[in-house]
Image (cartoon, grey):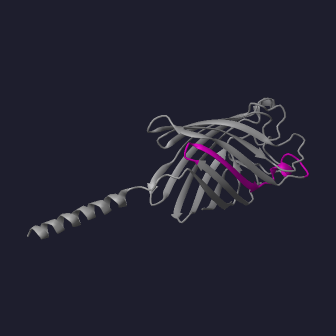
Amino acid sequence: MKHNQATVIVLATLLASNAALAQTKAPEPDYTWSYNVGVVNDYRFRAIAQTSTNPALQGGIDFAHKSGLYLGTWASNISWIKEYAGATDGSLELDLYGGYKGEISKDLSYDLGLITYQYPGNTAAVNANTTEVYAALTYGPATAKYSVSTGNFIANPNSSGSAYIEVAATFDLGNGVTVTPHIGHQSIPNVAKNAGDYTDYSVTLAKDFGGGFAVSAAALGTNADKPFYTDTKGKFLGNSALVLGLKYSF
C-alpha cells in the first residue's frame, strides 16, 4: 500500500511540474523584425488621394526593441507629385521613421517619434520631401496623436509648422474583426484663405484571417477645399471613397 501511495505522489508531482512548465511563457526576445506587403485600390494620406484614386502596391519593414525603441521604413507608388504638384518626375514615396513607445500606467501608453516622407527624384517647384515629429497617447482602445512638420509640408511653400491632430479608437468585435472610427484635422500655414486646411473622417472595418493575412474596408471623406485639392487632370483628391486593402504580414 505504501508503495502505491508513493507512486501516486510521484506521478502527481510530475504532472504538476509538467503543467507548470507548459504555463511558463517563453522569454521575451530582445528585438523583433516584421515585414508587410499589401495593395489598396486607392492610396489615401489623411484622406487625400495620393494615386489619383488608382491602386497602389505597398510594403514595409519594422524593427522593435523590447526597450520600446522602434525603427521602420515603408514605401508606396504615388502620382500626386506629377498630377498635383506639376513635377516631371517623382512616382515613389519612401517613409523612414523611428521613435520610442512606453507605458505611463496599465491602461495609458505613449509614443514619441519622427517620420520623414521622401519622394526620390521629385522635381516639384517646392521640394515635396517632408519631415514631422509626433506624439501620441493611447488609453484603452482610443489614441490621440499630434504631428507637426519641421519644414515645408508636402510641396507647399512657407508651410513649416503644418500640423495634423487626430483621434481614433479600435474596437474588437471578435473573430478577428475590428472597427476603427477616426477623425483628423490638417492645417497648413500661409495658404490664402486657409484653403489647405480641412477635416477628414473615416470608419475602417478590418478582418484578420490569421497566418498574416488581413483585409480592410475604409469609408472616408473630407471637407477639403475642392479648387485647392484638385489635380492638373481636374480630379478632386479629397472626394469621399471606399478604400479596400489586402495585407500580408510576416
Estimate the x, y position of residue 91 in percent, counting from the top left. 82, 55
Q: Nearer the viewer, residue 4 or 47?
A: 4
Magenta-colored span: 65-88
Position above or below: 42 against 48: below
Residue for point 22% across, 67% down = 11
Q: Residue furthest front?
A: 3
Q: Is residue 238 visible?
A: no
User: Seen from this angle, which residue lies furthest left?
Assistant: 1
The quarter of the image holding the N terminus is: bottom left
Above or below residue 24? Residue 157 is above
Tell me what residue is drawn at x 54 percent, y 55 percent. Answer: 205
Q: Left or right of 133: which side holds 190?
A: right
Instruction: Name the residue: 60% across, 47% down.
Output: 202
Residue 89 is left or right of residue 201, and the answer is right
Q: Position of residue 6 (x, y in %)?
A: 15, 66
What residue appears at the point 82 percent right and 43 percent down from the top-left corner?
128
- Depth check: give the residue in front, 126 or 240: 126
